[in-house]
Image (tube, rainbow, N blue to C red):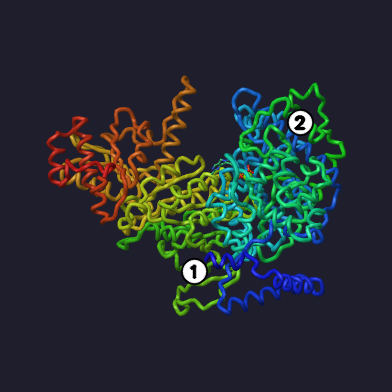
Amino acid sequence: MDQLDDILHQDLDPTETQEWVESLSAVINREGTERAHFLLERLVDSTRRSGGYLPFDPTTEYVNTIPPHLEAKMPGDGAMEWRIRTLIRWNAMATVVRANRKPGELGGHIASFASSATLYDVGFNHFWRAPSADHPGDLVFHQGHSSPGVYARSFLEGRIGEDQLDLFRMEVAGHGRGLSSYPHPWLMPDYWQVPTVSMGLGPIQAIYQAQFWKYLEHRGLMPKTDRKIWCFMGDGECDEPESLGAISLAGREGLDNLIFVINCNLQRLDGPVRGNGKIIQELEGVFRGAGWNAIKVVWGSYWDPLLARDKNGVLRKLMMETIDGEYQACKAFGGAYTREHFFGKYPETREMVANLSDDDIWRLNRGGHDPHKVYAAYHAAVNTQGMPTVILAKTVKGYGMGAAGESQNPTHQQKKLDDEAVRHFRDRFNIPVPDDKLKDVPYYHPGKDSPEVQYMLERRKALGGFLPQRRRHTDVKIKAPELAAFEQITKGTGDREISTTMALVRGMNLLLRDKAIGPRVVPIVADEARTFGMEGMFRQIGIYAPFGQKYRPQDADQLLYYREDQKGQVLQEGISEAGGMAAWMAAATSYSISNQPMLPFFIYYSMFGFQRIGDLAWAAGDMRSRGFLIGGTAGRTTLNGEGLQHEDGHSHLMAGAIPNVRAYDPTFSYEVAVILQDGTRCMLEDQEDVYYYLTVMNENYAHPDLPQGVEEGIVKGMYLFKDAGKPKKGEPRVQLLGSGTILREVIAAAELLEKDFGVSADIWSVPSFIELRRDGFDAERWNRLHPEAEPRVPYVTGLLQGHQGPAIAATDYVREFADQIRAFMPDGMRYTTLGTDGFGRSDSREHLRNFFEVDRYWIAHAALAALAKDGKVNAKDVARAIREYKLDPDKPNPQTV
Ligand SMILES: Cc1ncc(C[n+]2csc(CCOP(=O)(O)OP(=O)(O)O)c2C)c(N)n1
Ligand SMILES: [Mg+2]
């Protein structure tokens, strides 16, 4: 290998090299660079065929990808745009500094936007179209901690008042007028479209949004347009697996509606991103390798004359050799330092800048701060066909902050500029704020009739309107089917045994048959369609494949073959739950982003949902997603053979933590039907900003008919499944509660209690402990605040009131799940919960349910123990249950083993 390195990097025969280079130069001069490229490819090809090991080098030299003579020229008034940008910079800085001079430690960031102001400005002034009658609009993912710069622009445009800037990060005191710390559609529903600040979530969402837009077009739900998704992100953010983890999908599917802009300011929070290397080169290689068009915007126009004089390539060599830690130091220490430590390295480069003053050297700008270079890159990006584009823009973190932070390691957290730093900022950007006002760091608005504001408004008018802006409701009206349409699954199965997973898939199929809703159903799988019995959909509605199916599938002669189709409806995202979730979020927000309501179902192994991709699930709530998440093969003991990493006993607790998620753990197929119908109505017809989480199981059993009048109870979370009637005199009575497959153990326990101990039981099905808890807390809170009014009775309390005996709940989830309603038990009703605390493991359902103490015997025993405490049976009865049901009293607590 060392020897190979020598051969590749050491010039063993400079004269011969020179001859080759001269021949190539002649070709370039005569026939152009394309011809030269062709010849080089042929030479490489023939060397490889002779057995030479030629490693792939996906990077180019450390200069701009677009040479000056090929740059598209920026239209508009450059000087005017500079002035506007300085005002935006000032107001963004003032927003954060003023917030941090108030008591309360509100936080905020100056340095990130300072480095990316030009990148945003060029987009706002020249590229990003708002939705209008003529265009569906572009979508911009703003880097989260650059939000002050976006607010500052809206302030100049007159969309946000000065009072609101003063409510930055004060959303409580602001009573709806406060400005979110970061992009939060939940808190600013007319403004922000996508939450981004949890790093990595923006990039992965952007990729799947772009895929989904193509899907809408291919399926004929939207006309083909040139709309684009622009995703801004930090260079440090690229460390997140979500940031780069899905880029190959964008390359593979040729998502030319997608543009990443990576602000390479060489720093992250603590220090340099790649002090010992070069982040731009690293990213260029990674993206190009994944099939992206990579455009580097490294140097600003002031470098052009120097690069033009660099005939022997020494400056380029120096640029390539210098590492990011050194580049950072140059911007931190100034012109003299740069002359000495950068240009001074070689006589040729030292000589090149001999006539420049230190200030001139300092002004040699980076590409991301030069609107002309940025414009040229954006222009190339929007005109790229057949592949996504990444723009790697080199900038300075804290640009303009001077000694208070420019290019300095701690700058990310600098939010309290002192008076001197504010003065420096004012002078650097020539802001017309007088000295005596500086100490207040006042906002500056040049007036709505000023040329600057008029220019901005004219630009936005030409581009269709203001951005960001968010649509709250779709114009497309959709009627949800009545419950009768789900008859196939509200009817009992007789003796036939099916799982709730099968019921759910049947329900989806019924929705697919609905004329209005059918085309809007988006089944999404992460390579698990067969696990959930959905392979029938492959043939029936096809798997989305942007380029169709170019091969004959292995199972072509089967009825249910693997059919890929450009118009396919199933999104098969491969083994990527994060990808499936991001695709689901794109479909679930399509009503807002594309004015196209969709009904996505992402069905996955329940353990790999909220636990694995919980942060996306949280963002989905923030962004007001509407759709169904289906945790398949759920339950700690129901998914019996798969073991510790697969068996989910807690996803409901995580789902319940997201305020706008409605989560259900149904037992019977009619419960699935009622929830599907209700969800479709709430989300599609009533346009509520909620999403649904359903756990479905793979245990087969017979399902009864939909009982009369239980629909409302299912939706609210609980109904009486079996009424034992008025207790006979002296007959002990218990209330048994359960959900999911464990409700069936509860039903069996009731039989045991009756038969073996003469205890009768009312049986309650509880599809949603979470809905019960929310309702209970709400009533409790209201009662506390309205001490003199007639108290509200929580729904669960009302149901159980008047029923006798202790209550016992058992589920396939941790005990805390059923415990959520403890506070709402009617006075005097003892409450015992059983659950599956501890690590899952492989075994039969029977063994697992015994191990976790949630089977019929443990439930019956818990009921007797509670009755004994209430003095309704004797301790002897409890002991008999332990004996007869073979319960091991010395078995360790499953939580601990
Ligand atoms: C998932 C996640 N982890 C950590 C953070 C905290 N954080 C906010 S900004 C930041 C540094 C960002 O650096 P970079 O991406 O380079 O952006 P820059 O500010 O330099 O433009 C960090 C670590 C976060 N927001 N999200
Ligand atoms: Mg950075």
Mark 2, residue position: 424
Amino acid bearing label 2: His
Q: Is residue 808 shown above or below 604? A: above
Amino acid bearing label 1: Phe
Q: Nearer the viewer, residue 147 or 542?
A: 147
Q: Position of residue 746 (x, y in %)?
A: 27, 46
Q: Name the disc covering residue 343, or none.
A: none
Q: Please tell me whether mark 2 or mark 1 is closer to you in this view.
A: 2
In the image, is 51 to the left or to the right of 635?
right
Q: Is mark 1 within 8 Å of ligand 1?
A: no
Q: Is residue 165 shown above or below 895? A: above
Q: Nearer the viewer, residue 534 or 359?
A: 359
Q: Is mark 2 within 8 Å of ligand 1?
A: no
Q: Position of residue 265 (x, y in %)?
A: 66, 45
Task: Give the Cα separation between the discs numbered 2 and 1.
Answer: 64 Å
Residue drawn at x 36%, y 52% as measured from the top left: 645
Say few, some or many: other residues with alpha carbon within 10 Å of mark 1 (under 14 / 14 to 19 / 20 or more).
many
Is the Cβ of the residue at disc 2 closer than 8 Å to that at disc 1? Answer: no
Residue 702 visible here: no
Mark 1, residue position: 538
Q: Quadrant of the C terminus?
A: top left
Q: Position of residue 743 (x, y in %)?
A: 31, 48
In the image, is 313 to the left or to the right of 684?
right
Residue drawn at x 55%, y 58% as measured from the top left: 246
Q: Secondary structure at mark 1?
A: helix
Query: In the figure, residue 489 lies in which quadrant?
Result: bottom left
Residue 172 visible here: yes
